[in-house]
Image: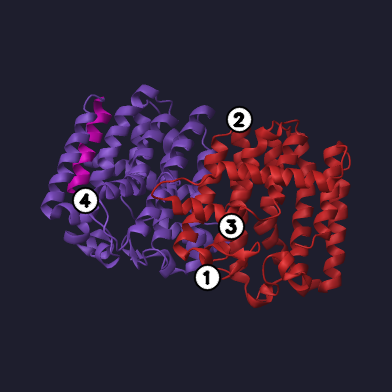
Chain colours: A red, B purple
Amino acid sequence: MGKNFDAVYKERADAVETALDKYVTLKNNYQSKIYEAMRYSLLGGGKRLRGVLCLTGGLLAGGAEKDVMPFACAMEMIHTYSLVHDDLPAMDNDDMRRGKLTCHKKFDEATAILAGDALLNGAFELMLKSKGRESDTLKAMEIIAEASGTEGMIGGQTVDLMCEGKEISKDLLLYLHRHKTGALISAALLSGYVACGGKNEGTAVLREYAEKIGLAFQVVDDILDITGDEKTLGKPIGSDNKNHKNTFIGFMGLDGSKEYAKELSAAAAETVKGLGEEGKFLAWLAEYLCDRKF
Amino acid sequence: MGKNFDAVYKERADAVETALDKYVTLKNNYQSKIYEAMRYSLLGGGKRLRGVLCLTGGLLAGGAEKDVMPFACAMEMIHTYSLVHDDLPAMDNDDMRRGKLTCHKKFDEATAILAGDALLNGAFELMLKSKGRESDTLKAMEIIAEASGTEGMIGGQTVDLMCEGKEISKDLLLYLHRHKTGALISAALLSGYVACGGKNEGTAVLREYAEKIGLAFQVVDDILDITGDEKTLGKPIGSDNKNHKNTFIGFMGLDGSKEYAKELSAAAAETVKGLGEEGKFLAWLAEYLCDRKF
């Protein structure tokens, strides 16, 4: 790639941000408020990890950035909708997200419910307008829809709610996070790859890599909820404790969790080392996610 | 069709019900609660108007019932998700729906939010698994996604919330209902037609018919909120007044509204009279919707 991977990440994240701004425009009609609320929550924040993974998947399959961009943006829209709904008073009741007020605090609960719905629906509208080969589009959408559904993210959120304040096994904690966070991270990379015609034999390695970084990502989330800086993080620390969440810290302590995240990211990096320059980028990304401060 | 249209409607509605029961199964895993909540709200109630329209669209295009069924069920899932979220305390705060407790009353608010999300997401999962021609599937999904999005149903819900307790023009009331209810009714018929390979030249007539019955449907809804029987209706009457909703009654009185609904349904029936037996069924349906008691 001829430049450092930090710059590559930033370039891809910025490209996703620019495309989101273009796809989800403010419309001057009677329902302009819904576009305001969607854009408020969607733009100007977030690491764009899922978008970057999706773009990278597309590039790995030999696709062009513009062809995979609708899927990358759809991933970010689905991720944002899940945050908007998760933050609602009936769910985690959080006031701050990405360094600003949550959607229901900035607007109101009804608008936040509708804005979340609109982001999920809009993600599918966007993918349906993509211009790739029809069979690839359908396959990529299927990967994403399954990962965000009841056997993926929504399933994980359901388990999360049921487990609050209860002691659970480490197996159930892993199950929860594989569904709640891991499924979408995995789908990001795979859907990009498949949307650009990536062959079936390539998917196993990508899935293995994504599962490992998805888990590492969650372990680091739990660590940051204790050791993080609120300003850098953009949300209050200690919210897991407030919401009586089960975390990796509870099972393996802070040092043990740090060690576990490192092991996972090293193992993830190992799986992709044969995949050329994009593989090197993914290996770097695994380490980077482990060291992140936000 | 060789039988009366009441029986045809019932047969199609029952087929949709049976298919929904099969598609949205209860799973015995950690997140079984989400399937319970989805099934609770989805099954055992509802007129299945959107499902029946979608099947009829498919039959009009020469398709088989089984080919269009995933789209018919997706329409019902999207309709149900919108009701589950609309009933939430932050939205219309309704306790009864389809003759039983609303989802958040039966379960809790968090579960109702997730169950709504899951029904919307599940609708797309279901359509993506349909076995029709890829280009037809994508086109039908696009019709549905647009109709349920910010320029369709969600747009209408947004306008509805903004207009509560305010005096609005008749034009805005029409805009509101064309988006909130009309868009999905229209998409039901058109998506079924397109999913089964229906030709472009057939869509204008179906769109005109659907727009008219969509509006008539809403006018009758407003009438039933005053004259209806709570038990037959399955929800309390007078809720428009309680929620300070603008209704057709406010603009044209009860008798004027009845007259308007009749005119719309007669005009709708007129548009489809050249479409053979299925056209006759649609014409009957327009009158039937006007005379409905629930």
* Side (left or right) of A216 relative to B40: right
Secondary structure found at label 4: helix
What segment carries the magenta color? Answer: B276-294
Whether tag 2 and tag 1 are in contact, CB under 8 A, the answer is no
Considering only vertical position in the picture, is B135 above or below B77?
Answer: above
Q: Distance between the residues labelled 4 and 1?
A: 35 Å
Circle nearer the N terminus (2, 3): 3
* Residue at 65% in and 46% down: A17
Q: Residues within 10 Å of mark 4 (few under 14, many from 20)?
A: many
Secondary structure found at label 1: loop
- In the image, which is nearer the foreground, mark 4 or mark 1? 1
Circle nearer the N terminus (2, 1): 1
Name the mark on residue A82.
3
* Residue at 59% in and 35% down: A138
Name the mark on residue B220.
4
Residue A275 appears in the rendering: no
* Residue at 88% in and 54% down: A266
Confirm whether the magenta stretch covers residue B279. yes
